[in-house]
Amino acid sequence: MNLSVDTNGYTAFCKNDSIAVDAMQKADRILLPLMVVAELRAGFSVGRKGAENEAILQRFLNSPRVSIESPDESTTFVYARLFGYLRRKGAPIPINDLWIASLTLQHEATLLTFDRHFEALPQIPRWG
């Protein structure tokens, strides 16, 4: 199983949340969208444990099962389709989360997230 990890999914994993740990253990491949890495580092930059959290993130990224995924031209088609779907439903979600959803769908992954607004996208499989 490919597992795409949202920012709060990564944070839950670091806090030893049983749902997040179970998902990570069962994943064959773990995708960390570029936006998630940016959100994490933005949080580190204003937190008291920035260097410690960066070191933990680096160890996570060094795992052979983990890769940072960036949007490409193919992602833009998925993004446009999801954007249109949400617009028709009248249920917009934050732009970073729309990119995360697009990368998740593009890579046929299951999304580890605790954000309820992803429920507006039933085409995105979610963990838990």
Image (spheres, rainbow, N blue to C red):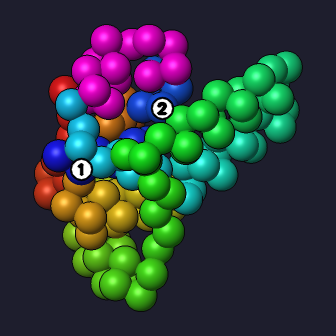
The residues colored magenta run 13-25
**Can residue 107 be seen in this snapshot?**
yes
Q: Which residue lies furthest to the bottom in this view?
A: 73
Marks 2 and 1: CB-CB under 8 Å? no
The C terminus lies in which quarter of the figure?
top left
Q: Residue at 72% across / 43% down in the picture?
A: 41
Can residue 119 be seen here? no
On screen, residue 28 above or below 96: above
Q: How far apart are marks 2 and 1 (CA)?
A: 15 Å
Q: Is residue 62 left or right of residue 76?
A: right
In-front residue for pair 49/56: 56
Mark 2 neighbour density, 10 Å: few (under 14) some (14–19) many (20 or more): many
Q: Say which residue label 1 marks.
A: 2
Question: Is residue 67 shown in magenta?
Answer: no
Left or right, residue 24 beside residue 56: left
Q: In this view of the protein, which residue sits in the foreground, 68 or 46? A: 68
Name the side, left or right, on which 94 lies relative to 44: left
* Residue 44, horizontal then vertical, whole percent: 76, 34
Give the number of the mark in front: 2 or 1: 1
Q: Which residue is drawn at 30% across and 58% down?
A: 104
Residue type at tag 2: Tyr
Residue 14 relative to residue 30: left or right: right
> Dot 2 corresponds to which residue?
10
Residue at the (14%, 57%) spot, across then down: 123
Identify the element where label 2 is drawn.
helix
Q: Is residue 89 above or below residue 41?
A: below
Query: Main structural element of the magenta stretch: helix, strand or loop?
Result: helix
* Three-letter amino acid code of the residue under disc 1: Asn
**Where residue 117 sits in the image (x, y, percent)?**
34, 42
The stretch drawn in magenta includes residue 16: yes
